[in-house]
Image: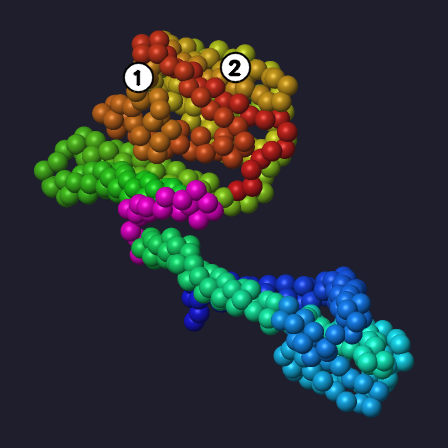
Amino acid sequence: MRTLYVRIIATTMMIMIASALIAFIGTNIYYQHYLKPENDEKVTQITENIVTVFENNNYQRVAPYFNSMADLGYKFYLVDQKGNEQTYGEDFRLHNLAPESKAAVLNGETYHGIADYPWQLFVTGFFDDELKNTIGVPIEIDGEVQALFVRPNTQQQFGEMRIFLAVLLVLALVFSFLLVLISTRFIVNPIKKLTDATKKIAAGNYHLKLKVNRRDEIGRLANDFSKMSDSLEQTEEKRQEFVSSVSHEIQSPLTSIQGFSQTLREENLSEEERHHYLSIIEKESKRLSALSKQLLTLSFLDSEADAGNVVTFDLADQLKETVSTTEWQWREKDIAIEMDIASANVVGDPRLLQQVWMNLITNAIRYSEPGGTVTISTAEEKDDVQVMVKDTGIGIDEQDISKLFDRFYKVDKARTRTENSTGLGLAIAKKVIELHRGTIMVESEIGVGSQFIVSLPKSNSFSEM
């Protein structure tokens, strides 16, 4: 399997090679369409000047003149009427000039071989050392018209420059490949660290700290990965804490049931004692049943299952029904119930919201002293409806308010243990309110009482579960 490191190197090198080829082809096209005509015109002018100088100097000796011109970086090919040929300077690589081209120059025409040189994809005509890639003009030597063909000696004119450019190109490619190898490793190393860290997280090791000091996308990825690791670690800690709390809550009633069941086996117990122990077993069984039901409710809410009972209903009717259901509880403690409830329609799951009001009102009754007051009121605003449940009970300490909605958290563990509290009621209430895109807040003062404020949107914004 090819690694990311190899893929990046191969891709980068392919891009570099492809870019070089495309640049070479583009340069060749530019030369063929723009530079070649200019080069043809320039060499033509130089050739005509060479002929003019020769003819204006009383037709000096041919060989010394053209040899001296060749030293300036040109090649000359001379042919007379009889077809005799003579080359001055370095010889041409190919003698492929057509006879008709020679004849045309001997007849007084100018041959534009550079401009007419055929286009080739991977060859720049400027450097193609062929006889047909020249400029031809007629020249009079010893009273006879001959044909002179001229082109620059590119090897002489650009020899050192060509070597310099070749060395520059080779070094650029070599160093580019080396830098690609180094930079790619620099890019890939953090990804390797992320891969190793992912394997460790998959194995259950969430205590990971990635040291990737970068501000690019990989750095942000590593930072997000670290946050994810921390979140998973906190989730795992909460899960273990939840399992521990569930085990503790289940173990307590089971221990009571087991202990009192063994006690009932004794034959010397009175009927009153048997009745007392059986009532305790019944009470602990109900507590265990309530715990299991609440755990199932939390599991249902956490699983985000689809809620098929989302309807529009009157919140006031539901609150009144809840108060009626809890009547025996508040009458038993001689608690006054005050209601300031106005009709208000909301969209949601009535069954789940019924459980919220039951938990809040039951708690208000439970923590209010006999003769106290529980006030239930509503307030309708533009986009939402607020429900307030206020009691005159014992109140909640400020340090406990932030943890009040945590699962299994109990403000007064000694007191609530005897009250069949599981510590899940407010956690369920908060989860239900959040699924309805609402909020729940609490205000409390020790010795004065507490007030829970629930805000629910009017629109159909129930979260899919």
**Magenta highlight on residue 218:** yes
Give the left or right position of residue 257, taking residue 88 as reference.
left
Q: Visible in this render: residue 142?
A: yes
> What x and y, as percent, mark residue 458?
62, 26
Residue stretch rendered in magenta on the structure: 202-222
Please tell me which residue is depicted at 35% across the width and 54% down the height of the picture.
Answer: 193
> What x and y, as percent, mark residue 156?
59, 71
Q: Visible in this render: residue 232?
A: no
Secondary structure mostly taken by the magenta-highlighted segment of the chain: loop
- Vertical relation: 300 (above or below) 350: below
Please tell me which residue is depicted at 30% across the width and 53% down the height of the picture.
Answer: 204
- Mark 1 is surrounded, within 10 Å at the Cα level, by few (under 14), some (14 to 19) or many (20 or more) other residues, namely few
- Quadrant in which the N terminus is drawn: bottom left
> What x and y, as percent, mark residue 11?
52, 65
> What x and y, as percent, mark residue 311?
62, 34
Q: Are marks 1 and 2 in contact (CB under 8 Å)?
A: no
| Amino acid at pointer 1 | Asp
Is label 1 or label 2 in front?
Answer: 1
Which quadrant holds residue 402? top left
**Magenta highlight on residue 387:** no
Element assignment for label 2: strand
Give the left or right position of residue 388, taking residue 270 as reference.
right
Element assignment for label 1: loop
Q: Which residue is mark 2?
A: 377
Q: Nearer the viewer, residue 331 or 150?
A: 150
- Vertical relation: 62 (above or below) 165: below
Q: Nearer the viewer, residue 315 or 326?
A: 315
Please tell me which residue is depicted at 65% across the width and 72% down the height of the picture.
Answer: 68
